[in-house]
Amino acid sequence: MKFMLDTNAYNYLVDHNIPIDLLKGEFYTTHIPEDELNNSTNLERRKSLNQKFISLHNKVTREEILLDNGSILIKTTFENPIVPTGSFVLGYSKLGGAEIADDNLYEKLFKILEAEKPKDKGNPQDALIGDTAIKKGFVLVTNDNALRKAVGEHSPNTKGMDFSTFIEVMKNG
């Protein structure tokens, strides 16, 4: 199976000390989770999250850069390339890391998330992750009920599963 993990999945893997060798299948990501993980203000937490991310995505190189303000930027390169997001959204997408969409799937997902999660203002990053999972045919792993609902409403072929279901699937092969 081909999986795409929402950013909160990496937190779950770290918080529950899930070993990467338990996870079976092909794992894909976009730049979105990596960007969000690198925004963690807790340095130790950011290191733990990045280590989990790197080990899951077949890391090739890792470089820590000390910035003038004392923070550390962690730059990673992966054996398996990060897939581009299924749509380009100004202010969230990276040039070269997003496809130009000829549909309005992202907008549909965003509107559902905006209605379901008004305090998050719809969370454009989640809409991009859902958009990409649908377009690439990945199983989306997230504990975000609104995101799973939005994906399910717009793609009968794309599965969404919560972490406990995902871990059971991994354990039972």
Image (cartoon, rainbow, N blue to C red):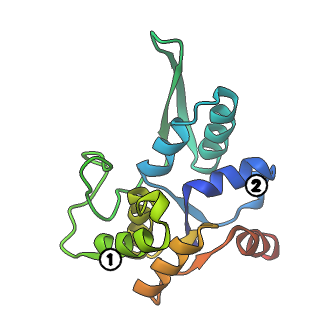
Residue denoted by label 2: 21
**Residue toward you, 67 or 59:** 67
Q: Residue at x 47, y 87 (%)?
A: 157
Answer above or below: position of 23 versus 61: below
**Residue toward you, 24 or 139:** 139
**Residue toward you, 105 or 95:** 105
Local crowd size for mark 1, using a 10 Å CA cut-off: few (<14), some (14–19), many (≥20): some
Answer above or below: position of 7 versus 44: below
- Which image quadrant: the N terminus? bottom right
Answer above or below: position of 98 versus 34: below
Q: Which mark is residue 60?
A: none
Mark positioned earlier in the residue sequence (2 or 1): 2
Q: Residue furthest top?
A: 68
Position of residue 143 in the picture relative to residue 65 (left or right): right
Q: Give the image location of residue 92, x and y in percent.
A: 33, 49
Q: Which mark is residue 108?
A: 1
Q: The residue tagged with tag 2: helix, strand or loop?
A: helix
Q: Residue at x 58, y 31 (%)?
A: 41
